[in-house]
Image: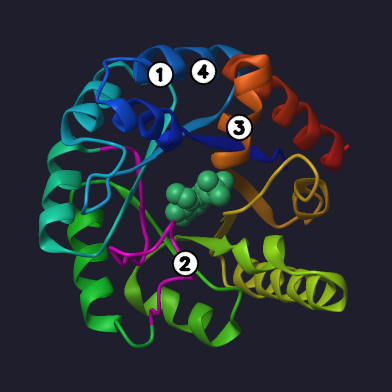
C-alpha cells in the first residue's frame, strides 16, 4: 500500500500574513508541491484566520489538481464554509484561539453530538471526513458511530517526547493504527513530523497518509518547497520499500 503525502501549506500563508504582503504566493507554492508529486494539499482555515484566509480556500479549491484536505473546527460557520467550498476531504480538528498550533486531538467522546452533526453535514455534501484524534482506543471506538471513514492520528506527543516516553508514544500509534484498521477505518497521521522523526511512523503499514507542514516549509527556506516535497516523498517511499 503506498503511503500518501498531504502537504500542509498554512505556514506559507503565515509568512505572508506577518507583513500583509501579497507574497509568498500560496497558489505558486501549491503548484510546486503538486509538481513534486504530493498526493494532497492540506490547509487549515482557523477561526482566528491567523494564516489561511477565506479567499485562499476558494482560490486553492479552483486550481488544486490533487485532493484538497480542509482542516476545520466543528462549528456551524466552518462546516458551512466547507460545504460551500466542497473539498474532497475535511479533517475535523479541535481549536483553541490561544494555542500556538493544534494541541491534542479532538475529544470525540466528550463532543460526540457536535462532531456527529458536523460529520453528517459534511458527508451529505459529499466530503470525506477525517477526525483528528489521539492514538487512544477509547476514542477510536466511537468513530464508526460518528460516521467518519477516516481518522488522522495526532503524532504531536510522539514528536515532542524523549527517551522511553517516545517509545511509549510510538507504541500507542502502532496499537491505534492496528485497532482502527481492523475496524475498517482509514488511518492517516500527522503533526510535528519532520525529516528525522517521520521514517519510523511512515513504516507503520496501516497508515495511508501523512499530513506534514511546518518542517517542510522550514526546509523550503533553504531548498525551495518543491525540493522539500521531493525529499519528504523519497523518505516515505524508502520507509515502505
Ligand atoms: N494534521 C493536522 C490535523 C494539523 O492540524 C496540522 C497542523 O495544522 C498538521 C497535520 C501539520 O502539522 P505540522 O505543521 O506540525 O507538520
Q: Is residue 75 magenta?
A: no
Taking 179 as reference, is 165 left or right? right
User: Alpha-carbon distance for marks 3 and 4?
Assistant: 18 Å
User: Alpha-carbon distance for marks 2 and 4?
Assistant: 28 Å
Q: Which residue is mark 3?
A: 218
Q: Please tell me which of labels 1 and 2 falls first in the chain.
A: 1
Q: Please tell me which of labels 4 and 1 falls first in the chain.
A: 4
Q: Give x and y (percent) for residue 199.
A: 81, 46
Q: Please tell me which of labels 3 and 4 falls first in the chain.
A: 4
The answer to whether residue 61 is above or below residue 178 is above
Q: Please tell me which of labels 3 and 1 falls first in the chain.
A: 1
Badge number at residue 103: 2
Circle 2 packing at 10 Å, graded few (<14), some (14-19), many (20+), is: some
Q: Which of 18/155 is in front?
A: 18
Kind of element beneath mark 3:
helix
Q: Nearer the viewer, mark 4 or mark 1?
A: 4
User: Alpha-carbon distance for marks 2 and 3?
Assistant: 20 Å
Tell me the colour scheme of the image. Answer: rainbow
Kind of element beneath mark 2:
loop
In the picture, the quarter occupied by the N terminus is top right
> Residue placed at 59% from the left, 83% from the top?
137
Taking 166 as reference, is 45 left or right? left
Magenta-highlighted residues: 87-108
Amino acid at each position: 500500500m503506498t503511503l500518501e503525502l498531504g502537504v500542509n501549506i498554512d505556514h506559507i500563508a503565515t509568512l505572508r500574513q506577518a507583513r500583509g504582503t501579497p507574497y509568498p504566493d500560496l497558489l505558486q507554492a501549491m503548484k510546486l508541491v503538486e509538481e513534486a508529486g504530493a498526493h494532497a494539499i492540506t490547509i487549515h482555515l482557523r477561526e482566528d484566520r491567523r494564516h489561511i484566509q477565506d479567499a485562499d480556500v476558494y482560490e486553492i479549491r479552483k486550481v488544486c489538481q490533487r485532493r484538497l484536505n480542509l482542516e476545520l473546527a466543528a462549528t456551524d460557520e466552518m462546516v458551512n464554509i466547507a460545504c460551500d467550498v466542497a473539498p474532497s476531504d475535511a479533517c475535523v480538528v479541535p481549536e483553541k484561539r490561544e494555542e500556538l498550533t493544534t494541541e491534542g486531538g479532538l475529544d470525540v467522546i466528550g463532543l460526540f453530538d457536535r462532531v456527529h452533526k458536523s460529520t453528517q453535514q459534511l458527508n451529505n455534501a459529499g466530503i470525506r471526513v477525517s477526525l483528528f484524534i489521539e492514538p487512544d482506543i477509547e476514542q477510536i471506538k466511537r468513530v464508526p458511530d460518528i460516521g467518519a471513514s477516516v481518522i488522522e492520528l495526532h503524532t504531536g506527543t510522539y514528536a515532542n517526547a524523549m527517551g522511553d516516553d517516545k517509545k511509549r508514544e510510538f507504541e500507542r500509534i502502532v496499537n491505534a493504527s492496528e485497532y482502527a484498521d481492523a475496524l475498517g477505518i482509514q488511518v492517516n497521521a500527522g503533526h510535528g513530523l519532520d525529516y528525522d522523526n517521520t521514517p519510523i511512523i511512515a513504516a507503520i503499514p496501516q497508515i495511508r497518509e501523512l499530513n506534514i507542514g511546518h518542517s517542510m516549509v522550514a526546509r523550503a527556506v533553504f531548498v525551495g518547497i518543491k525540493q522539500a516535497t521531493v525529499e519528504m516523498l523519497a523518505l516515505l517511499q524508502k520507509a515502505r520499500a
